[in-house]
Image: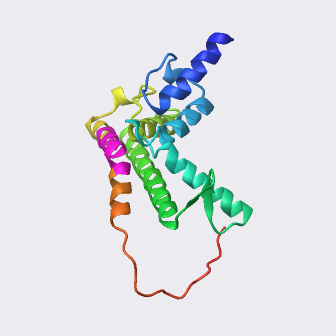
């Protein structure tokens, strides 16, 4: 029991940052692979070398969700307010990350031969590449050149993209001299 618990903690920490594995990733249950996908997508801290959208981005989105559930107009974390620009940046980084992972998964599904469980394996590989975790279910070694190129591009964009995008969004902020009439579309 103790070894399995230690393996679980190590896998959870390693999948967000280092990509080391003590358990055969290809032999894991689908629900475990999905959980690791979530951890790899979130990634590590903003100042670290881990990939993913970053823990702070996830926390800002969580704070926005909590504020919305509570009916508050403003979001805050630990007694500090979050600006609307920060919320927009976090949402942009997260949604572009989701889009990139979905596009990468689609390409990997298109280039792999028909296999049982191909969707989860392709999703895992795409999230692992985006999160620069380095974990694999064994699909990467069997990919044709187009699939391997997709993984390479996703690794590069996953490492450089979110940081560059967040910096560009922060530096690009401009104020408008007018406001448009507000619309209240039906959400949900």
Q: Along the horizontal axis of the image, is 155 left or right of 84?
A: left
Instruction: Indicate how the structure is coloured in the image.
Output: rainbow
Which residue is rendered at x = 71% and y = 61% of the image? 69
Residue 9: x and y in percent read 59, 23
Which residue sits at x=60%, y=30%? 32
157 lies above or below 172 = above
Residue under the image location 47 percent in, 44 percent down = 54
In this rendering, the answer to whether 163 lies above or below 115 is below
| Nearer to me, 156 or 77 | 77
User: Count the marks: how many?
Assistant: 0
Question: What residue do we see at 42% from left, 39% from top?
Answer: 131
* Camera-nearest residue between 99 and 143: 99
Helix, strand or loop: magenta stretch: helix
Q: Point out the image quarter for the C terminus.
A: bottom right
Asked whether residue 34 is drawn in magenta, I would say no
Magenta residues span 150-163
- Residue 176, quarter of picture: bottom left
Q: Is residue 107 left or right of residue 15?
A: left
Q: Position of residue 185 (x, y in %)?
A: 61, 78
Q: Residue 158 in the image: x percent, y percent?
A: 37, 44
Q: Nearer the viewer, residue 132 or 145?
A: 132
């Amino acid at each position: 029991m103790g070894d399995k618990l230690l393996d679980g903690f190590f896998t959870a920490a390693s999948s967000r940052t280092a990509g080391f594995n003590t358990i055969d990733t290809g032999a894991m249950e689908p629900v475990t692979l999905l959980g690791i996908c979530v951890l790899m997508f979130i990634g590590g801290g903003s100042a670290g070398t881990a990939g993913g959208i970053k823990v702070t981005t996830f926390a800002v989105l969580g704070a926005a969700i909590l504020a919305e559930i509570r009916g508050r107009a403003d979001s805050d974390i630990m007694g500090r307010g979050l600006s609307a620009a920060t919320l927009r940046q976090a949402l942009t980084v997260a949604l572009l990350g989701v889009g990139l992972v979905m596009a990468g998964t689609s390409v990997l599904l298109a280039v792999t031969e028909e296999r049982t469980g191909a969707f989860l394996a392709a999703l895992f590989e795409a999230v692992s590449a985006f999160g620069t975790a380095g974990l694999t279910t064994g699909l990467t070694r069997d990919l044709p050149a187009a699939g391997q190129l997709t993984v390479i591009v996703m690794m590069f964009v996953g490492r450089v993209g979110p940081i560059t995008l967040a910096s560009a969004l922060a530096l690009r902020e401009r104020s408008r001299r007018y406001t448009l009439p507000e619309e209240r579309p039906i959400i949900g």
